[in-house]
Amino acid sequence: MTVTMADINNGYEQKFQTDRHHKEIDLINRDPKQVNEDVVKVDFEDVIAEPDGTHSLDGVWKASYTTFTVSKYWCYRILSAILGIPMALLWGFLFACLSFCHIWAVVPCIKSCMIESQCFSRIYSLAIHIFCDPLFQALGKIFSSVQVVLQKDV
């Protein structure tokens, strides 16, 4: 039995092929495309601010900051732990349905309309050339002998 380079390369390619549904997930940068950069990035200073001349006690301000930050952090974590997977399932289902409709209904319908409109476009173009061109050529010949003279009365 002879082993060729093609067989060896084929073996390596099979080892390195990855399923696109099981890609590596970056646990550090969870928004690499900055989808939520401006939308939900809310800190304590973005919501609660005391102008000069109106300050609460320092202890109250620090406790408010800690309460806001910790409650926001844990509320998000609890909600995402409870509802994250069902919402991912719901959104996955919704986008799958949208993709299905787009691929199997919208694009074929648009293509069909484009094909039909080309047919009507040719008929319309032919009708314009048959009926309108002679009319406008005749009008052009009629009005080509018209001369406009502009005189200024003093």
Image: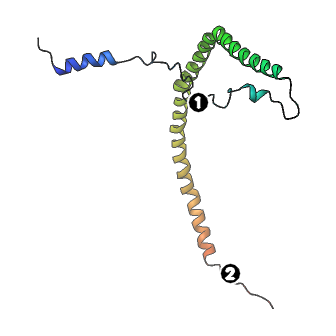
Q: Label 2 amino acid?
A: Val
Q: Which x, y percent locates residue 19?
A: 41, 16
Q: Quadrant of residue 39?
A: top right
**Which residue is most to the bottom?**
154
Q: Secondary structure at mark 1?
A: loop
The image shows a total of numbered marks equal to: 2
From the viewer's perspective, tell me whether residue 6 is left or right of residue 109.
left
In the depicted view, which residue is nearer to us: 54 or 112? 54
Q: Which x, y percent locates residue 105?
A: 55, 25
Q: Quadrant of residue 50?
A: top right
Look at mark 2 in the image and give the residue it sits on.
Answer: 148
Q: Residues within 10 Å of mark 2 (few under 14, many from 20)?
A: few
The Cα atoms of the two marked residues, 1 and 2, are separated by 67 Å
Query: Which residue: 51% across, 47% down?
Result: 122
Residues tagged 1 and 2 counted as in contact (Cβ below 8 A): no
Q: Quadrant of residue 29?
A: top right
Q: Label 1 amino acid?
A: Gln
From the viewer's perspective, tell me whether residue 153 is left or right of residue 6.
right
Q: Secondary structure at mark 2?
A: loop
Look at mark 1 in the image and give the residue it sits on.
Answer: 34
In the depicted view, which residue is nearer to us: 99 or 151? 99
Q: Residues within 10 Å of mark 1 (few under 14, many from 20)?
A: few
Query: Which residue: 68% across, 81% down?
Result: 148
Say if 34 sits above or below 1 in the image: below
Q: Nearer the viewer, mark 1 or mark 2?
A: 1
Say if 10 sits above or below 82 in the image: below
Q: Which badge, 1 or 2, is on the more N-terminal residue?
A: 1
In the depicted view, which residue is nearer to us: 40 or 91? 40
